[in-house]
Image (cartoon, rainbow, N blue to C red):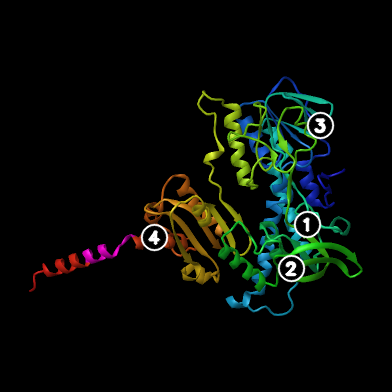
Amino acid sequence: MNNVRRDGILPDDAYDRELAANVRPSNWSNPQPSGAYNLAVIGAGTAGLVTAVVAAGLGAKVALVEKALMGGDCLNAGCVPSKALIRAARAWSGLRNAEEFGLRIAGEVGYDFAAAMARMRRLRARISNNDSVERYTRLGVDVYLGEGRFTAGDRIAVGDQTLNFRKAAVCTGTRATAPPIPGLMEAGYLTNETVFDVTALPRRLAVVGAGPIGCELAQTFARFGSEVWVLERAERILVRDDPDAARVVQQRMESEGVKFALNADISEVSRAERGKIVAYETPGRREELCVDEVLVGVGRAPNVEGLGLDAAEVDFDPTAGVRVDDHLRTTNPSIYAAGDVCSAYKFTHVADALAQIVIQNALFPHPFGLGYATTRSLLVPWCTYTTPEIAHVGMTAAACAEQGMETETYTYDLAEVDRAILDGEEEGFARLHIKKGTDRILGATVVAEHAGEIISEITVLMRAGRGVKTLLASIHPYPTQAEAVKKAANLWRKTRLTATMKRLLKNYYEWSRSRVRRV
């Protein structure tokens, strides 16, 4: 049995055989199409899966076409395996720092990287049931395994079969790419699509790119015991995030042994007996690293090749992906797109949200009440799962300034939050950007051990159009690290008490005391 992945063959163990049986069963026979589909979906990543299953749940006749593995990047080479490894690495790190909590370990501790990878594959296989061919078939979706391509504006070919449709959705996602570094291809490298197949810990690892993927995996492998270098062309890491937030993460990673080369331009990668040689230049210096593996953590390309988009009169760009309007319609009004293949926000949760928009617009056309949902109202939070995590929603201070919006920014350090002190997790802060003269929250950043959990409170407030007053009126359990958000809001409340108001209140209190009858 060939367990086909886009980039090759899955490791042949019980867990990946279970995964393949769910998301690419070898004994699968495609259904025979009968009549036109209300909705045909190409790509079974998050966007495609959500689009297909919701449409089928509404009673539509739905086809779902996938050429590789059901579940797409998120399940097979993204969120699921990476977070499993991050958790294992955090456990290793916690054990090494256990003395702080009074734990004395007698004797030698054994570390088993292969076991950590096996745990990841076991959990991934378990979760894959949710994205399985069997489940989606049971839920009423016609699943076609094979390469789908448009042959006209209302037809898709899968092998020798033709699927007719009224509406279609392109949800083919993106794939990892590498920068054009001389010698990189010949020397060999890892990406997020191949790193989770590794079973032996690389002793020395160079990570190209200090974005979310690069930083998450660099810290993870350093905690497992690799000697890790991160090379980044920009002058700092995590350039989308606030500089001081990124600095907190960099300092933590450096304390755990990760070395950074910023403003670094990689000139060549070559092979030698002692390993792979990465030559790079920083201002005024030329350096070389000798490593066992190179992990490329930058670069994504939309999967638009071979789809027959020209035949369907769907406009696309090899770099930017499928072009859509605010309603996610392509240049063919019967065809929509969702997920990474058309979105600037390449997150699983955004792919889910875009799928909901496609459903409303494709299956409930205006003026029947539910159509014409738009991307303009999306409020997108994101999180980088380093330790500490960085989570953000809404506008940054820089974005507010660019748009000429007067803001007030309030930051509260975790080092002043009781639960963070008790947990030994004092690195970080909660920050709110408030529109001047109002209580409206324009954006927020949280740097904390579980910032991704904390940011949702602010996201809900912003989406509901509620501001800092609602946050302050809400009771928070004590002690939690999320108190940092409310304490940041308290800083805003204190500024509402002006010097004049303080003086008036003081005069009133003095007057009220003078009215008390003495006995």
As drawn, is 405 to the left or to the right of 7? Answer: left
Q: Going from the N terminus, do you reach mark 2 or mark 4 first?
A: 2
Circle 4 residue: 492
The numbered dot on residue 195 is: 1
Q: Which residue is drawn at 65% across and 62% down?
A: 237
Give the residue at the far front of this rendering: 284
Q: Residue at x 46, y 56 (%)?
A: 433
Say few, some or many: other residues with alpha carbon within 10 Å of mark 3 (under 14 / 14 to 19 / 20 or more): few
Which region of the structure is painted magenta? 496-505
Tag 2 and tag 1, C-beta contact below 8 Å: no
User: Is residue 29 visible from the viewing direction of this image?
Assistant: yes
Circle 3 residue: 29
Indicate the position of residue 14 as horizontal and vertical percent values: 81, 51
**Secondary structure character of the magenta stretch overall:** helix
Circle 2 residue: 282
Three-letter amino acid code at the position of disc 3: Ser
Q: Which of marks 2 and 4 is in front?
A: 2
Three-letter amino acid code at the position of disc 1: Val
Q: Nearer the viewer, residue 499 or 281?
A: 281
Q: Going from the N terminus, do you reach mark 4 or mark 1 first?
A: 1
Cα distance in 3D space between marks 2 and 1 = 27 Å
